[in-house]
Amino acid sequence: MITKMGNKIGEGGCSEIFEWENANQIIKLARDNTDYHAMKQEYDNSRMAWENGLSVPQPIALVDMEGRPGIVFERIYGETMMERFVKKAMERGDEEEASTEHGEYNDIRLTAQVLSEIHNKPGLRMPSQREAIKNSINSVDYLSKDEKAAVISLLEDLPVKNQLCHGDPNPRNMLLRNGKAVVIDWMNASIGNPEADLAEYIIMFRYAILPDYYPKEITSHLDSNREAIINAFVEEYTRLAGITSNEIDAWIAPIAARKLSADGISEEEKILLIHEIRRRLQEQKD
Ligand SMILES: Nc1ncnc2c1ncn2[C@@H]1O[C@H](COP(=O)(O)OP(=O)(O)OP(=O)(O)O)[C@@H](O)[C@H]1O
Ligand SMILES: [Mg+2]
C-alpha cells in the first residue's frame, strides 16, 4: 500500500493528508490522538453527506495503513478559505477595514450559503448534537462545576431542532472550487440546531488568536475586520435561512464552553472565552 502514497499536502489537528494513488485522490491519515472509531464516524458522515448531494469530497474508502486508520477521499483542487483570507490580508496590508464594495466578504457569504444548504438537507441520520455538546462541556477543566451546570441549563432551555450540522465550520474546513465552497472534515457532524454551527463560526472570528507564525499583517487585518465579517456572515445566513442574530446569541455561551474542550486553540484564546462565558452567566443572574 505504501507505494500509493505521495507528498504531504496538508494537515490538521487530528490528521495528515497525502497524495494518493492518482491525481484525483488524497488519503487522510489519523494522528495518535484519533482512533479508528472517530475515522469511521467521519467516513460514515461524509458518505451520508455525499450521497445526499452536499458539496463535499467523495469518500472512497476507509483504510488501515499499518495500524494507522485513514480515509481515501476525492481530492479537491482549490484553496481553503483560510489560505484565501491570508492571501487577501497580505495584499491589503494592515491599515484599512476591508470594503464590502469590492466583494471582500464574498468568501464569508459563500460559507453562509453552503452552511444553509447543509442545515436544510432533510432526512439524514447522525449522532445527537445536544448530548455531544453536554459531554464536551462536562469534560472542560476551565470552568467550575456550578458554572458548567449553569451553562448546560442554558443549553437545555434552548428550543430543539433536528437539522444536519457540520460541527466545525472553520475556514480550514472549506475549500473554494469553481466559485463554490466545498466542506471537508465531517468528524463532528450531528443532528441538532444550526445555531450551534453559526455560534461556532462567530466565536471563532470574534476571539481567534492566530499562531505566532502568521505575519503581523494578517493579525491586524483580522483585528480590524472581525465584527464586519461576522455581520456579513449573519446577514447572508439570515437572508437565506431566516435565523437571526438574537437567536444565535443564545448559543454563544454553550458553544464557547464546548470550545474550551478543544486542544487546537491557545490558552490566551481560552481565557477570552472564559471571560465571555462568565460575563453571560453574570448577566443571567442580574
Ligand atoms: N479532500 C481534500 N482535498 C484537498 N485538500 C484536502 C482534502 N482534505 C483535506 N485537505 C487539506 O488538508 C487540511 C486538513 O484536513 P482536515 O481538516 O480534514 O484535517 P483534520 O486533521 O481533521 O483537521 P482539524 O484540525 O480541523 O481537526 C485541509 O485544511 C486541506 O488543506
Ligand atoms: Mg480540519
Image (cartoon, helix red, strand yellow):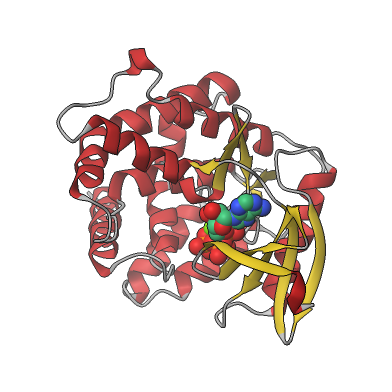
Rendered position, 248 above or below 47: above
Please provide percent x and percent y for residue 191: 69, 51
Residue at the image position 45 percent from the left and 48 percent from the top? 200
Please provide percent x and percent y for residue 220: 19, 42
Rendered position, 68 above or below 57: below
Q: Quadrant of residue 281?
A: bottom left
Q: Quadrant of residue 89?
A: top left
Left or right: 236 with respect to 213? right
Residue nearest the observer in this picture, 284 or 22: 22
Please provide percent x and percent y for residue 236: 49, 23
Residue at the image position 53 percent from the left and 34 percent from the top? 111
Q: Quadrant of residue 224?
A: top left
- Image quadrant holding the N terminus, namely bottom right
Left or right: 179 with respect to 109? right
Residue 155 in view (yes/no): yes
Ligand 1 lies in which image quarter? bottom right
Please provide percent x and percent y for residue 139: 46, 76
Residue nearest the observer in this picture, 143 or 93: 93
Extreme residue in the left direction: 95
Residue at the image position 42 percent from the left and 61 percent from the top? 259
Numbered circles on residues, count: 0
Left or right: 281 with respect to 33? left
Residue 130 in view (yes/no): no
Residue nearest the observer in this picture, 92 or 276: 92
Extreme residue in the bottom direction: 67
